[in-house]
């Protein structure tokens, strides 16, 4: 009578093949592949905004004339973003670049890293605001690691740049958006060396992302900043200038970078001027 066994046959692998298989396994284990859309591990530089703000404040200290460029909504348009960087690098009269948000389309780490690597080719410092597309998935966490806080401010010469997260729809009711506590502290602790203010955001009041319940309170609050010059925003993907509240404060919306243009603002003792530049 034959006895059945359930044991698998023994397979003998020559020792050199064992070494090859072990080496391959170690190599695969050491690779950092983006295997999940919610991956938040960062390759390359982080803390971009804080580092560049330090450069801006040092370079512009004591000055009463400031010139900066505004770009926004670079998601998907990598070639156009490269062309914008090249165009800005050909100039020698810009102090810094302000990106009004939406580097990413789906909040993926790879999108942020690719955009950062393109923008890092700028000869001048740049700062980036948080856009609504940047909030998708784990984009908020990735943005915080690579660029920094969603609300921040800095002083360039005698101009206080107040940069805000206004993407209320993406935050639900988790936190107050805009952050009126942050705005209150900025007003109360306004630096003595600053005499003019510019407020920047991704989405402006009365758009689908902004919480319209607080739109007029928001405008009343930002008008408390000394010598508020104007506001800048992205999100709409088209150049637009509008006085939203009939109070003399203009909102300047920049094109998406796919339209191959950027804005340049000059702020001096006489006031300010702007230009829309094609590249």
Image: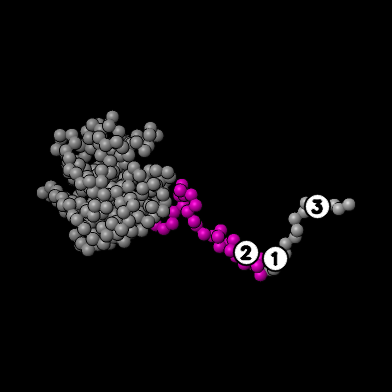
* Residue that appears at 49% across and 52% down: 35
Mark 3 surroundings within 10 Å by alpha-carbon count, few (fewer than 14), some (14 through 19), many (20 or more): few
Q: Position of residue 69 (x, y in %)?
A: 22, 53
Residue occupying the far right of the picture: 1
**Which residue is more in the foreground, 48 or 183?**
48
Residue 258 in view in this figure: yes
* Vertical comparison of 125 with 129: above or below: below
Q: Please identify the residue farthest to the top as the structure is shown.
A: 213
Element under disc 3? loop
**Rendered position, 121 above or below 139:** below
Q: Which residue is mark 3?
A: 5
Q: Earlier in the sequence, mark 1 or mark 3?
A: 3
Q: Residue at x 72, y 62 (%)?
A: 11
Residue found at x 45% / y 48%? 37
* Neighbour tally class for label 1: few under 14, some 14-19, many 20 plus, Cα within 10 Å: few
Q: Which residue is mark 2?
A: 21
The circle drawn on residue 13 is 1
Q: Of the numbered discs in the image, which one, if any, rests on residue 94?
A: none
Verify CB contact (< 8 Å) between mark 2 and mark 1.
Answer: yes
Q: Single out the mark in the foreground, 1 or 3.
A: 3
Q: Is residue 73 above or below residue 184?
A: below
Q: Position of residue 204 (x, y in %)?
A: 25, 39
Mark before the other along the chain sequence, 2 or 3: 3
Real-space Cα distance between discs 2 and 3? Answer: 30 Å
The span picked out in magenta is: 16-45
Q: Position of residue 51 (x, y in %)?
A: 34, 55
């Amino acid at each position: 009578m034959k006895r059945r066994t359930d044991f698998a046959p023994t397979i003998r692998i020559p020792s050199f093949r064992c070494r090859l298989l072990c080496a391959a396994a170690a190599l695969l284990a050491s690779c950092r592949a983006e295997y999940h859309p919610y991956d938040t591990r960062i390759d390359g530089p982080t803390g971009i905004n804080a580092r560049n703000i330090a450069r801006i404040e040092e370079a512009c200290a004591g000055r009463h004339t400031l010139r900066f460029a505004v770009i926004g909504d670079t998601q998907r348009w990598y070639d156009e973003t490269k062309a914008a960087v090249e165009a800005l690098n050909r100039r020698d009269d810009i102090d810094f670049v302000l990106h009004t948000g939406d580097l990413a389309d789906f909040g993926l780490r790879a999108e942020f890293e690719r955009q950062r690597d393109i923008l890092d080719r700028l000869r001048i410092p740049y700062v980036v605001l948080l856009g609504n597309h940047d909030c998708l998935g784990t984009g908020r966490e990735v943005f915080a690691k690579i660029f920094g806080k969603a609300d921040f401010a800095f002083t360039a010469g005698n101009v206080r740049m107040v940069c805000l997260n206004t993407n209320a729809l993406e935050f639900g009711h988790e936190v107050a958006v805009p952050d009126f506590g942050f705005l209150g502290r900025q007003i109360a602790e306004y630096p003595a060396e600053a005499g003019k203010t510019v407020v920047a955001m991704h989405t402006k009041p009365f758009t689908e992302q902004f919480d319209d319940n607080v739109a007029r309170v928001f405008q009343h609050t930002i008008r408390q900043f000394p010598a508020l010059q104007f506001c800048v925003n992205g999100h709409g993907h088209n150049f637009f200038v509008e006085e939203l509240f009939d109070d003399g404060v203009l909102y300047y919306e920049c094109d998406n970078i796919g339209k191959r243009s950027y804005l340049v603002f000059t702020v001096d003792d006489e006031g300010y001027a702007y230009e829309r530049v094609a590249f």
